[in-house]
Image (cartoon, rainbow, N blue to C red):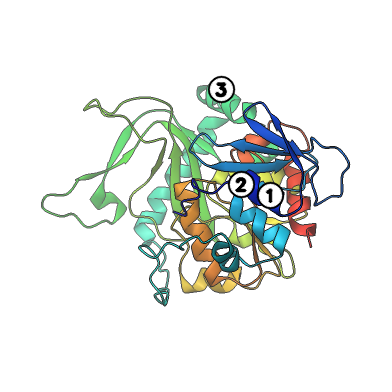
Amino acid sequence: MLDQTHIDLPAVIERSGVDLHREGKGYRGACPFHGGKSNTSLSIFEKTAGGWGWSCFAGCGSGDAVAWVMRREGLAFQDACEFLRLDLPTTHEPRPLRPPEDAPEPSDVWQAVARDVAERSERVLWASTGTKALAYLRSRGLTDDTIRGAHLGYNPTDRWIPRAEMGLDMDDDGPRTVSLPRGITIPWTVGTAIWKVFLRTPEHSRPDGTRWPKYHQISGGGNAPWGVDAIVSGKPLMLVEGTFDALAVAQEAGDLITPIVTGTTGARRVRWIARLASAPLVLLSYDADVGGDQPTVYWGKVLPNTRIWRAYYDDPAAMLSTPGMVRAWVDSGISFQ
C-alpha cells in the first residue's frame, strides 16, 4: 500500500498554483483542468480511511495525491511517487518482476458442473424464486439487458457439492465438498470456457455460525479476467476490481471503453497480459484503498499507456446511482491529455 496519510494534499495543490479556501472540514477551489471560473468546482476532502482526496464536480477526475501530481505535473506514476517522496511498495512485487506464468483452463469436469450451476441459477433469477434477487440487481441501476448479457443468476439455497464430482483432488485433512452459498451467481467466461463462478451473498451464516464472505468463489476455477472477449483493437480498456463495477461501465459507456475485471491480484498471466498490452490506453480504476493500491502499482509497471483514473466516489458501481456520472467519468478519462 502507498501510505499517503502524511501528505498535506491541500498544500500540494496550492503549491501547484490553485487558490483554495476552507469549506467545512475540507477545501474548495477552481479546478485547473477544465479552466473553470467557479471557485467551488474542485473539492479537497478528508477520506474516512485517512489522508486526503480530491474531486472535480465538472467531471475532470478525482483521486489521491499521486493522481493529482501525475495530472498536474504531467508525470508518470513512479515519477509522481518520487515527486511526493513516496516509497513504492516492494514486499509484494519484487524487482525485477517475476515472469508471469501460463493460465491453464479448469478441467472439463469442473467446467461442466460450474456451467450447470450458472445456467440453473440464471433460470431461477427470472422465475418467482428469484424475484428479490432480481429486484436487488435492478436497485443497483443495472438494466435487464445488462443482467441477461452477463448471465447473472440466483442460487436460492446453501448447498455443497462433493469435490470428486467437480474433478478436484482431496487432501486427507482438506474439505470434502465445494460450498455454494445462497446468492447471486456471476460466471466468468472466456470464449466457450467457464473459468470462475462468484456468488454475491446476502448477510447470512454458515451452519457452524460463521458468516459467509460478501463474495465467494467456487473452488477449482482458473485465473482469468472477466471481459477479455470484448477487447477490440484500438479501443481503450479500463481495469477494475469487481464485476458490478465493470457492468456499470459497460452499460453506461461500453461504446467508449471496454471494462476488464482482474480483482486485486488476478489475471497476471502471459496470455492475458499480451491481450491487455495491445490497448492504446488502459485506465487503472481500482478502489482507492489497500486492496486497490497493489494492482494499480503492478499493472502500471507491466502495461504501457496506463493512467490512474479513480472513481469520483467509492467505485463505478456506486456512481451508477447518479444518472450520467459513469459516462462523464469515462469520457474524461479517455479524453484527458
Could you say which quadrant of the image residue 258 lies in?
bottom right
Picture layout, residue 243 above or below residue 143: below
| Label 2 to label 1: alpha-carbon separation | 6 Å
Q: Earlier in the sequence, mark 1 or mark 3?
A: 1
* Disc nearest the viewer among 3 and 2: 2
Instruction: Name the residue tied to disc 3.
Output: 131
Could you say which quadrant of the image residue 79 lies in?
bottom right
| Badge 1 vs badge 3, beta-carbon distance below 8 Å | no
Instruction: Please state which amino acid type lies under the numbered disc 3.
Output: Thr
Point 41% across, 49% down: residue: 114
- Whether residue 67 is visible to the viewer of this picture, yes or no, is yes
SS at mark 2 in the image: helix
In the displayed orientation, state which residue is furthest to the left: 172
Q: Decide: few, some or many residues near mark 1? Use Cα within 10 Å; few <14, some 14-19, many ≥20.
A: some
SS at mark 3 in the image: helix
SS at mark 1 in the image: helix
| Badge 3 vs badge 2, beta-carbon distance below 8 Å | no
Instruction: Please state which amino acid type lies under the numbered disc 2.
Output: Leu
Q: Earlier in the sequence, mark 3 or mark 2?
A: 2
Point 80% across, 50% down: residue: 32
Instruction: Name the residue tied to disc 2.
Output: 9
101 displayed left or right of 7 = left
Point 52% across, 42% down: residue: 51
State the image coordinates of residue 177 (x, y, percent, origin top left).
24, 43
Picture layout, residue 82 above or below residue 116: below
State the image coordinates of residue 55 (x, y, percent, origin top left).
69, 42
State the image coordinates of residue 296 (x, y, percent, origin top left).
53, 58
| Label 1 to label 3: alpha-carbon separation | 49 Å
| Badge 2 vs badge 1, beta-carbon distance below 8 Å | yes
Instruction: Name the residue tied to disc 1.
Output: 13
